[in-house]
Image (tube, grey):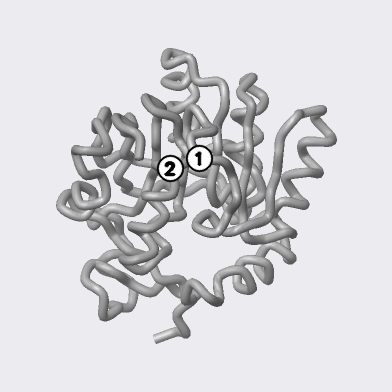
C-alpha cells in the first residue's frame, strides 16, 4: 500500500503537487455548472469554495458574477488561480488555510461548496469540515458538496484502507467512498434540509484529459443557527 496522506501531511502533499502544475485544469466541473444555475434561482450573492485548488470552479463562479472566496491549503494552487484572475480581470478573494482552522466569520456566506474535499478526510475530520461549512453559511443558505460514491470504479480497484468504505489511490491519497448511510450521517435533519441527494456523473477536465466520476451530489439548506 502506498503511504497514506494523513491530515497533518496534507498541506505539504498538495503544495508539492501544485508546485508542478495546475493539476485539475481550468474548465469548471459539471457540478459547478449545475450549482451556478441553482445559486441564481436562490439569489445567492456570496460563495465560499473550500479546497478550491487552482480555481477552476471558484473562477467560474466569479465570472458568473458571484462574490467568491476560495480557500486552499496550497499557496501554489492559489498562485495559479491568481494568475487566471489577473489575466481575466476577475475580483476574487483567495486565502491560504485549513477549513477547520480558518478565521472566517460565521454565517458570512450565502452558499458554501466543497468539491472533492470531504472524501479525502478520515471520519472525524469529515464531520468537522461539514460542521464548519454549516457554521460559515448564513441561516437559510446552501451547503453543497460532491464526493466519490461506492459506485465509482476506484472503490473496487484501489487498495483497501482499514476505515470502512475507504481506499488508497495510486498517489497515496485516502479516499472515502460514500454510500447513502454515510451521507445521511453528515446531514442531521435538525441542521439541514436536504434539497438534492443523488449519485451523478461529475465531468472534469484535469491536466491529464477529460474524466468522469460517479459521485454523491448533496445540496442542503441550513435550517437553524447555533
The disc at residue 26 is none
Please identify the quarter of the rendering in which residue 160 is found.
bottom left
Q: Which of the two labelled residues, at mark 1 and mark 2, occupies the earlier sequence position?
A: 1
In the image, residue 166 above or below residue 34: below
The disc at residue 135 is 2
In the image, residue 101 above or below residue 13: above
- Disc 1: which residue: 106
Is 86 positioned to the left or the right of 95 in the image?
right
Q: Which of 168 and 99 is in front in this view?
A: 99
Outermost residue on the left side: it is: 181
Mark 1 nearby-residue class (10 Å; few <14, some 14–19, many ≥20): some
Is 42 positioned to the left or the right of 80 in the image?
left
x 52%, y 32%: residue:
109
Mark 2 nearby-residue class (10 Å; few <14, some 14–19, many ≥20): many
Tell me if residue 92 can be seen.
yes
Q: In which quarter of the image is the C terminus?
A: top left
Secondary structure at badge 2 equals helix
Q: Distance between the residues labelled 1 and 2?
A: 5 Å
Q: Which of 128 and 67 is in front in this view?
A: 128
x 58%, y 50%: residue:
206
Q: Which of 26 and 174 is in front in this view?
A: 174
1 and 2 marks in contact (CB < 8 Å): yes
Instruction: Please provide percent x and percent y for residue 15.
Output: 67, 67
Please identify the quarter of the rendering in which residue 126 is found.
bottom left
In the image, residue 226 above or below residue 164: above
x 55%, y 70%: residue:
10
Amino acid at each position: 500500500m502506498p503511504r497514506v496522506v494523513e491530515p497533518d501531511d496534507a498541506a505539504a502533499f498538495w503544495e508539492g503537487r501544485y508546485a508542478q502544475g495546475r493539476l485539475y485544469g481550468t474548465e469548471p466541473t459539471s457540478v459547478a455548472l449545475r450549482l451556478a444555475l441553482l445559486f441564481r434561482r436562490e439569489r445567492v450573492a456570496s460563495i465560499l469554495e473550500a479546497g478550491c485548488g487552482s480555481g477552476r470552479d471558484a473562477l467560474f463562479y466569479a465570472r458568473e458574477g458571484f462574490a467568491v472566496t476560495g480557500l486552499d491549503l496550497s499557496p501554489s494552487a492559489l498562485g495559479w488561480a491568481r494568475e487566471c484572475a489577473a489575466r481575466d480581470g476577475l475580483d476574487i478573494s483567495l486565502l491560504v488555510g485549513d477549513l477547520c482552522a480558518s478565521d472566517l466569520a460565521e454565517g458570512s456566506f450565502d452558499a458554501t461548496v466543497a468539491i472533492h474535499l470531504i472524501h479525502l478526510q478520515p471520519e472525524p475530520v469529515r464531520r468537522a469540515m461539514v460542521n464548519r461549512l454549516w457554521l460559515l453559511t448564513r441561516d437559510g443558505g446552501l451547503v453543497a458538496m460532491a464526493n466519490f460514491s461506492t459506485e465509482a470504479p476506484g472503490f473496487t480497484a484501489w487498495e483497501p484502507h482499514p476505515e470502512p468504505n475507504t481506499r488508497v489511490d495510486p498517489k497515496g491519497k485516502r479516499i472515502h467512498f460514500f454510500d447513502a448511510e454515510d451521507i445521511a450521517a453528515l446531514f442531521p435533519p435538525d441542521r439541514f434540509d436536504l434539497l438534492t441527494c443523488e449519485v451523478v456523473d461529475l465531468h472534469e477536465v484535469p491536466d491529464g484529459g477529460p474524466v468522469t466520476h460517479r459521485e454523491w451530489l448533496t445540496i442542503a439548506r441550513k435550517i437553524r443557527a447555533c
